[in-house]
Image (cartoon, rainbow, N blue to C red):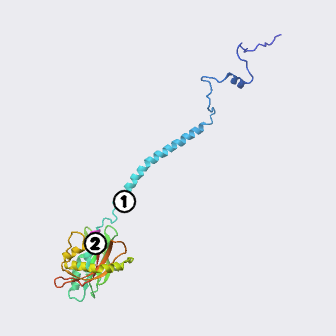
Amino acid sequence: MARRSIVQQDPGIPGDPELSAYPDAAEAERGPRRGRGAPRRGGWSGGGGRWLVWTGRAVLWALIIVIVVNGVRAPFERFTQQSTATGQGATPTDYGFPVDRASSFANQFAAVYLNFDAGTPGRPEERAGRLAPYLPDGADPQFGWDGIGRMSAGAIQPYGVEVIDAHNAVVTLVFQSENRRMLLSVPVYYADGDFVVSGRPGVLPAPAAAGLPQAAQPDRDDTTANELKPQLEGFFKAYAAGDTVQLQRYVDTDRPLTGFAGAFDFVELKDVVVPPGGTTREISVEVVWGCRPPRHRCPRPRPTPARWPGS
């Protein structure tokens, strides 16, 4: 009859610690292990935190890429914009049309076209001959004038040029006829260095005079103005006669005043404006001068403004 052995397969060696049913407790009793197999302290041994690390790295690299791309793109965009602006500035807005020469051509044409007189013998024929160099072949020699009436125009000046393309433009001129200002629009064709009037001109009224704002009337010190009038009259009489001795009484420097030397006569003080203020003020004086015929020829005496610094 066989008997089962009761001897343990791994008997305890004397001096070894006894095995416990609670491994964690036994591990705690032995204390922390050292060496390669010892677990790292203070860290999380779990693998679930790696995605946070990789996510942070991805965000950091994306930020670096954005900064680099913007740094490269900014100077490139500036260079492109400068190139575009330079190209646009170099593009002529007048299609290469000779604006100045077209204005001179139209001005000469208008000097002939706007002046005619049916009452003077030979004038219609003379006008037709002078118009011929400006008109296309086969055009009416008088270019719209029916041979009746008269017109005289002057003070013809360029007013503007509207360029249509490289060969066509409309030149606008301003002119004066009697007491009226008007505009003349002349269509002009250009090719191979030559010009021709390509159509009938149009006459339009010139823009009206702009409304000038009324300046506010300055404050006046009439009492001081009345006190200064005798002195001012004496000064302007000496100035008209060119009396240098008398003129030196009115200046506080050694620089001599010569005046008009008898070319004009002092007529009157039209107005004296003295602003209120202290001991030194800037006044405005309006003087009427007269001529001395026949030695000097000049228009009728009229008020002329003059400025006189006084106290």
Tag count in the figure? 2
Q: Report the Cα–Cα distance between label 1 and label 2.
A: 26 Å
Residue 170 visible, this angle: no
Q: Position of residue 55 (x, y in %)?
A: 57, 41
**Which residue shows up at 34% across the image and 78% down it?**
224
The crowding category of the residue bearing disc 2, from other C-alpha atoms within 10 Å (few below 14, some 14 to 19, many at least 20), is many
Residue type pointed to by label 1 = Gln
In the depicted structure, whether residue 114 falls above or below residue 73: below
Q: Position of residue 46 (x, y in %)?
A: 63, 33
**Does residue 223 appear left or right of residue 109 in this picture?**
right
Residue type pointed to by label 2 = Ser
**Tag 1 residue:** 88
Tell me which corner region of the image, top left, top right, bottom left or bottom right, holds residue 92.
bottom left
In the depicted structure, whether residue 15 falls above or below residue 199: above
Tell me which corner region of the image, top left, top right, bottom left or bottom right, holds residue 274.
bottom left
**Tag 2 residue:** 103
Q: Position of residue 114 (x, y in %)?
A: 27, 81
Q: Position of residue 236 (x, y in %)?
A: 24, 79
**Does residue 160 appear left or right of residue 247 in this picture?**
right
The part of the chain drawn in magenta is: 99-104
**Which residue shows up at 52% across the image and 42% down it?**
60
> In the displayed image of the protein, which residue is found farthest to the top?
1
**Quadrant of the image containing the C terminus:** bottom left
